Each structure stands twice: as structure tokens, then as C-alpha cells.
Image (spheres, helix red, strand yellow):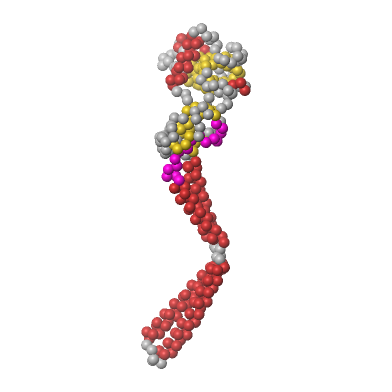
Amino acid sequence: MRSAARIGILAALALSACAGGDDPQDVLGTLERDRLELIAESNERLVELFVEEGDRVTAGAPLARQEAGAMEPRLAQSRASLAEAERRLGDLVEGPRAREIDEARATLKGAESTLTTERREYQRVADLVERKLLSASDLDQARARRDAAQAARDEARARLRLLEEGTRPEQLAQARAAVDRAKAAVAELMVSAERYSVRAPRPGLIEALPYEVGERPPVGAPLVIMLADGAPYARVHVPEPLRVAFAAGTAVEVRIDGVTDPLPGTVRYVSSQASFTPYNSLTQKDRSRLAYLAEITLEGDAASNLPAGVPVQVRLADGR
């Protein structure tokens, strides 16, 4: 992390070195590694830590887990809705069972028999009314029973025809859409639930575990802090007199205490803003105080195991 205080300290070190007895062609700084802060997605309780400070982990390794809280019942409810939608779709794809069609046929046969009986009864009542043996109201009641029997017959016939035709394409499309919608809801909740488990995004070293099991970290607080594996890079401050020579892609030599031979490197970044910028016109004396943040990629296998925080001296490869 590039804090203003750290940049100021490094700039002061670089400038004081140039002003002191060190070679003015040397640029000073430290080795750094990518620092990853894996944050808490919620303020739920921390229930498991799978690593300790100083452990090396591979990409995808589980590091910590928070309590899911309300996410678990929500996920269970969503899965139940998906199962219900899938059963509904399965029933529609399968279509009516033979037993249901047989039942509908039997119902239709009974309705037709009832209609035949009510028609005959209506005819007998009509004859008796014509002979003045029954009243007109009796004829109305017989007509109503006949019409009701006919309506029941028509309903049974329509239901049998519907079962024989099977499921409509529109119903299948709606059922499939319901299943897709339920699957999407489950997938969304699973992604959210997965965030309660912290995994290593890349290989590295566990630098710090700010919270203990049982604590409730605030949302966005770092649960795990790790340093990424791979070759470190040098972060230095380039004095203004050397700024023109330090450009992205420039080859440099990096000297490190404890390493016999200098390591080759390449400047990958140089800030366009100086660490110290006077508000007045830049005189020759003022310009010598400027320093520019730069990052240098170290090359070669020997750099992979170097620790972060070690001081370095960087010089242009051509000796300038």
C-alpha cells in the first residue's frame, strides 16, 4: 500500500543518500511484494481460520469462513422453490397419466348416462303437464335438471379431450421459464454464500490475521492479509537529476545486502508527479530536491525468494 508517510520516508532516504557519501548515481528504496487484503463480506461471526500467520498457501486454498447467518435459510428456501418448479415441469412433460384419462372417460360415461335419464324424465313430465296432471313448475324443474346434466356431460367431454391432447406448448414454456428463474435465484444466493468463505486468490504467504475465531469483523475489514508469491519488485525514489534517464523499459542493476551479485531489473513505472513540488518557481536548488516514485521489476530466479522490506540500491545498467 502506498501511504504518504512511507513515500515521504523513502524520498528522504533517497535524497539524504544522494546528499551524503553514497554514490549519487545510486537510487535507494526497498523490495516490495503485492499485498492482498481479503475483506469480510458481512459482520457475521468468524467461525473458522484454516491458516496461521507465516503459512504458505496455494491459489484457491481456504483461508477463513464466516457464519452464513440468514443466508442459509434463504438458500434452503430457494432450493425448495427450484425443486418444486422442476417437479411441475416434469409433470407437464410427462403429460396426463393413463389412469387420469381412464377416470375422465368414466366420468364422461356417467355424465352421458345421467343426461339420458334426465331427458327421458323431462319428456315424461312434459306429457303429464300437457295432460294437466302436473303443474308448469314441475316442468321447469325437470328442464333445469336436464340442462344441468347436459352441462356436466359437456364439461366431462371437454376435460377428456384436454387430457388426450396433452400439455400445451405454452404451459411447457412457462414451466421451463419458472425452472430457469429458480435456478438463477439459487445461483445468485450460492455466489453470495460463497463469499462468506475466504480463499486465496493466488499463491502467497499469510502475513497477518487481524481477527480471532468468534469475533465479528465489520463489513469491509480485512480478514486475511497475504503477500503474493513470485519475484518482488523494487520501489525506489528517483532524484530529479536522474529522472530523465529512468524511463519505463530501462534496464537497471539492483544491489541487495546479502546478495553477492547485482540482479538485473527493468523499470516498469515512473510517477509523473514528484514527491516534493515547491509552490514557487523551481530553481536549480529546488529541482535537486524533487524525487519521483518508480517501480522496478526484478528478473531471474534468484529474486523469487527474496523477502519484502529489504533495502536496495538501483543503478542504470549502462553505468550512467
Taking depth in this image into account, of 175 and 48 the one nearest to the observer is 48
Name the residue at the bottom extreme: 131
Taking depth in this image into account, of 57 and 133 the one nearest to the observer is 57
Q: Is residue 156 left or right of residue 219?
A: right
Taking depth in this image into account, of 95 and 4 the one nearest to the observer is 95
Name the residue at the top extreme: 21
In this rendering, the answer to whether 64 lies above or below 112 is above
The residue drawn where x is 48% and y is 52% is 80
Any magenta on residue 62? yes
Any magenta on residue 229? no
Residue 177 seen in the figure: no
In this rendering, the answer to whether 1 lies above or below 193 is above
Residue 303 percent location from the top left of the image = 59, 21
Residue 320 seen in the figure: yes
Quadrant in which the C terminus appears: top right
The residue drawn where x is 45% and y is 80% is 146
Residue 187 percent location from the top left of the image = 51, 46
The residue drawn where x is 54% and y is 12% is 26
Q: Is residue 172 left or right of residue 278?
A: right
Residue 45 percent location from the top left of the image = 42, 38
Taking depth in this image into account, of 186 and 24 the one nearest to the observer is 186
The residue drawn where x is 60% and y is 17% is 263
Magenta residues, as a range? 57-72
In this rendering, the answer to whether 108 lies above or below 138 is above
Residue 281 percent location from the top left of the image = 43, 14
* Tally of marks: 0
